[in-house]
Image (cartoon, rainbow, N blue to C red):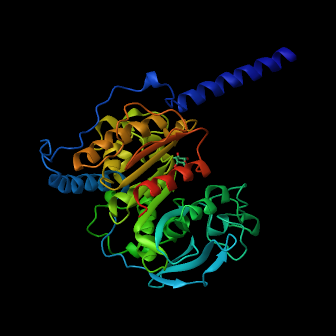
Amino acid sequence: MLTRRAFTVTSLATLLGSRLHAQDDTIYDESKVPAYTLPPLLVDDAGRPLRAAADWGRRRVALLDTFAAQLYGRTPGGLPACTVTQVDRPVPVLDGRALRQQLRLDWLGRASVDVLVYRPAHERPVPVFIGLNYYGNHAVDPDPAILLNRRWMRASEPNAIVDHRATERSRGTTALRWPIDLVIARDCAVMTAYYGDFAPDDPSVVRDGIAPLADGLQDRIPVRERWGAIGMWAWGLSQMRAAASSVPGLDATRAIVIGHSRLGKAALWAGVQDEAFAMVVSNDSGCAGAALSRRIYGETIARITSSFPHWFCGNAASWANREAEMPVDQHQLLALVAPRVLHVASAIDDRWADPRGEFLATQSADEAWRFLGGTGLGPVTDMPTVDTPVGQRVRYHVRTGGHDINRYDWTQYVETVRSTLHK
Ligand code: GTR
């Protein structure tokens, strides 16, 4: 009996093991990364090397166009601009060191998004971090005066989401990702909104945000080039930046777009399209974010476009298992931030996001900063050791630990702001 049971268990494990292996051929071994050649950065449409910094403008437009057509989709022209209203008056928090305020962005009464702002309690305008959050503004801080977001959310027990809705117990559940005290102490502000208000993160509900605003504006855009959720989140970030200019105490000319993981992809896409962002932060953005697609290490274009088809345009999935043929790779996306400030961060145990691939993309992108005459990464030849940030106008760090955004990461971001944007 015991033998029979043991046999059954073993054969089941073998079966499952081979199944898993067949399904999961994820590369986590550096020696299995294929040899690859990255598409060149500083060439014109005919493949000739760019000669002067002035040539970069045209190259930039061409690269943006390719990323839009092949990966993220095109941001429709003619979308309405938001109207900003105050939900409440600024309230002193953090023992009077900061002011907390809630705003509502509204588009012609057809869509609305609540925004939470923290800024230092003085009138001098400060740099502002603009980023989306995963579980609602009420999850950023336990403060009961923050409006509880009742819209659709992804299932999550730790965030006390019940039937896809937040509950009173959801308050403050993501506070560790938003060290407001630290940002205020370094004389910066934070502006955040729930990403699902712009586009709920599931194919079944993705249209329940701002998507209908684009109805009738996409007729001239080929179906396979139409935007997905990343495009909508990115547009939302730009709308928040525009709104920042009407908030006293925020310096919208020193706006920093920031995002973690899928929202890091959105932050990059927002930051490259909207040059009014002075700095762009990618935290563990991985595949289709800061990581090189051609390494096919960890998450791949095939995996991401099958798990999350609603994030991308229709053309994106056509590059599944054809990474080497893609007309662009992610170092070129990062380069579109030049000569502004870029900070890319990885976490060493976050192999799914390919930390080395994120560093190598950053290092290749640095060519654009050198070409345009600024100091980006500076004299960095190898991937730095953990917890050792490097660079100047292009900064990179890889942190101890796994997939997350934490106080250590934010400590590096406010330091980058201090060294590059503070007056
Ligand atoms: C994963 C996805 C990653 C990353 C991550 C996240 O499931 O594969 O690309 O976006 O989610 O957003 O936390």
* Residue at image coords 60%, 81%: 90
Task: Name the image quarter holding the N terminus.
Answer: top right
* Residue at image coords 12%, 46%: 51
* Residue at image coords 37%, 54%: 341
Residue 219 horizontal/vertical position (percent):
29, 70
Q: Viewed as shown, does residue 307 lie left or right of 35? A: right
Q: Is residue 344 above or below residue 91?
A: above
Q: Is residue 220 above or below residue 246?
A: above
Q: Viewed as shown, does residue 130 lie left or right of 313? A: right
Looking at the rendered structure, the number of numbered marks drawn on it comes to 0
* Residue at image coords 28%, 49%: 374
Residue 38 horizontal/vertical position (percent):
29, 36
Residue 36 horizontal/vertical position (percent):
32, 29
Task: Name the image quarter holding the C terminus.
Answer: bottom left
Residue 92 visible, this angle: yes
Front residue (pair 348, 19): 348
| Residue lying at the far front of the rendered structure | 423
Front residue (pair 266, 250): 250
Residue 175 horizontal/vertical position (percent):
67, 60
| Residue lying at the far right of the rendered structure | 1
Q: Viewed as shown, does residue 158 lie left or right of 57? A: right
Residue 329 visible, this angle: no
| Residue lying at the far top of the rendered structure | 3
Q: Quadrant of residue 351?
A: top right
